[in-house]
Image (cartoon, rainbow, N blue to C red):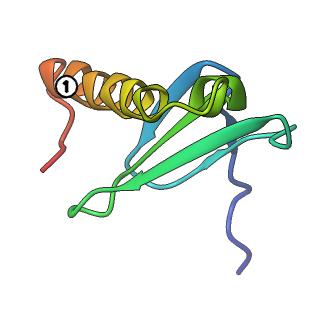
Amino acid sequence: MALPPVNIHDVAMQNYAYTLTGELGTTGLSPCVAVIILFSDRTIMMERRSDIELCKYGYETEVLNLLENIAKNIIRMKRIHLNIR
């Protein structure tokens, strides 16, 4: 018996998404950076950012700011009671 088709959510630029079952993707990734986070309960978060945010001027602080913003998004998800461990 064939499995039903799966809808894959396309994470747009400057956005993030969270899933319990892993149907996340992104198109046009070449000018971007996709950060994929796998949590211990096998849930997934994907964040898509402009490559300019990662290294516009080549400073370490740019990377630290990007990671800090991703951490803030994880905290926002926890506040709305998503099952993140």
Q: Which residue occupies the foreground of this view, 23 or 79?
A: 79
Quarter of the figure with the N terminus: bottom right
In percent of width and height, residue 29 lies at 80, 41
Q: What residue is shown with label 1?
A: 75
Residue at x 74% of width, y 35% of height: 32
Left or right of 60? Residue 3 is right
Location of residue 34 by image quarter: top right
* Residue 21 in the image: above or below residue 1: above
Count of labels in the image = 1
In percent of width and height, residue 24 lies at 60, 46
- Type of the residue with mark 1: Ile
Label 1 residue SS: helix
Location of residue 80 by image quarter: top left
Location of residue 79 by image quarter: top left
Left or right of 75? Residue 60 is right
In percent of width and height, residue 61 lies at 40, 27
Residue at x 49% of width, y 51% of height: 36
Residue at x 69% of width, y 44% of height: 7
Q: Which residue occupies the foreground of this view, 81 or 14?
A: 14
Please identify the residue farthest to the bottom as the structure is shown. 1
